[in-house]
Amino acid sequence: MTDFRPETRTVHLPQPPLNGSHPITVPLYQTSGFVFDDPDVFADGMGRPDGAFVYGRLSNPTVRSLEEAVAGLEGGVGAVATGSGMGAINSVLFGLLAPGDHMVAQKPLYGGTASVMSDLEERFGISVSYVPEYDPAALRAAVRPETKLVYLETIANPVTQVADLPGMCAVAREAGVLSVVDNTFASPILCRPIEHGADIVVHSTTKYLSGHTDVLGGIAVFASDELYRKVWSFNVKLGATADPFAAWLTLRGIQTLPLRMERHCSNTRELATRLDAHPAVSVVHWPGLPSHPSYELAAKLLPDFGGVFSFDLTGGREAGERFMSSVKLALLAPSLGGVETLVLHPATTSHRSLTAEELARHGIGEGTVRVAVGIEHVEDLWADFEQALA
């Protein structure tokens, strides 16, 4: 480099060799592209997800580390990381469905996913039928010759119904239909849907996988190499690729995922149990309570019951709004899965796009409050809830 002028030397910066060592943690490869000596290797890397690193929209070493890590946790053969959870969902649905196809989805769904289903029908001619998440017989009856895909959520948002993954995925497989499961609320620590017959698992990595409320990301994991390559190809065209810095932060978060999930679940158990006995609360929605309709199924399927629950106050919407404006430690904010405890009103936030009839169908009341429980000391959280209820 000594022969070049400063204007050139500032562009072509030196890269020190590692001298036989390697980093403890995955490095952040914050680059848009990669340089080649061999044009054949360059060309080969353009066409497959496991080739040489070429361009950031196709692949990146940090992003691939995240994909391999989550694929390993979920028991998949490959994964495609995206810029958000909705990016993963849309890459799968639009990458695999075509006009004239039919899909079946469970009745309680995340509001963003429900909006995508409406678009599939209204704009793209893909029909959608809805069945209860616990009823394989209803799914079997809903399948048509043109059915291509079944969409489920391990734990539904916000009233935490648990899907009968073994039963529903078995029906899908018998019918030759793909099964897709959103496993965000459970994380791979509580459930691995591929072990129950799922073909594809999606996550918003924004939530438990990253775990620190500082990342936006998503990922889709595949049980078959054919599906993996097909969706990767579509995602490259869609341009929903994950950012390497977000992937790097998510990898950092995954290292503490088991510890965090243990605390999320134990805190939730304590809060849900106490609220269930509180005179100001009419119902608590958490599958770890025997009163929850999914309790028996959840107890068979999951080692613990998750870090999100919701509840209705006897005073309805006014009481719910008063509670949310009165908490001091818990934060009125969207999302979940971070170290902080967050509360929100689903009817006007996460599920705001649904009609009153659709809200009722999803089990969401006007006064329903959703709580994403963090890892604070549970007694501090309970003191905050008590004063807000008062």
Image (cartoon, rainbow, N blue to C red):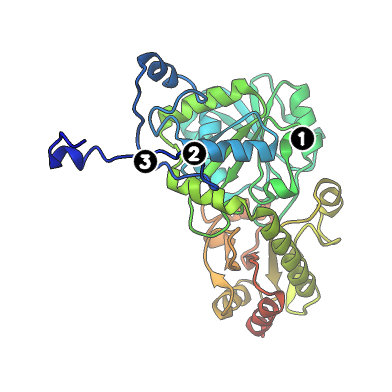
C-alpha gap between disc 1 and disc 3: 44 Å
Task: Give the residue displayed 65% in from the left and 24% down from the top.
Answer: 224
Measured as percent of width and height from the top left, residue 54 is found at 39, 27
10 Å crowding of disc 1: few (<14), some (14-19), many (20+):
some
Q: Label 2 amino acid?
A: Val
Read off the residue under disc 3: 16
Which one is earlier in the sequence, the residue at label 2 or at label 3? 3
Q: How many marks?
A: 3
* Secondary element at image label 2: helix
Q: Is residue 97 above or below residue 106?
A: above
Task: Give the residue displayed 62% in from the left and 22% down from the top.
Answer: 225
Read off the residue under disc 1: 195
Measured as percent of width and height from the top left, residue 202 is found at 61, 40
Q: Is residue 20 above or below residue 389?
A: above
Q: Which mark is residue 207?
A: none
Read off the residue under disc 2: 63
* Quarter of the image that includes the N terminus: top left
Q: Label 3 amino acid?
A: Pro
Measured as percent of width and height from the top left, residue 208 is found at 61, 54
Task: Give the residue displayed 78% in from the left and 74% down from the top.
Answer: 274
Name which quarter of the figure residue 97 lies in. Answer: top right
Viewer can see residue 159: no
- Horizontally, residue 164 falls left or right of residue 88, namely right
Q: Label 1 amino acid?
A: Glu
In front of the other: 231 or 161? 231
* Secondary element at image label 3: loop
Measured as percent of width and height from the top left, residue 337 is found at 60, 58
* Secondary element at image label 1: helix
Which one is earlier in the sequence, the residue at label 1 or at label 3? 3
Which is closer to the viewer, label 1 or label 2?
Answer: 2
Which is closer to the viewer, label 2 or label 3?
Answer: 3
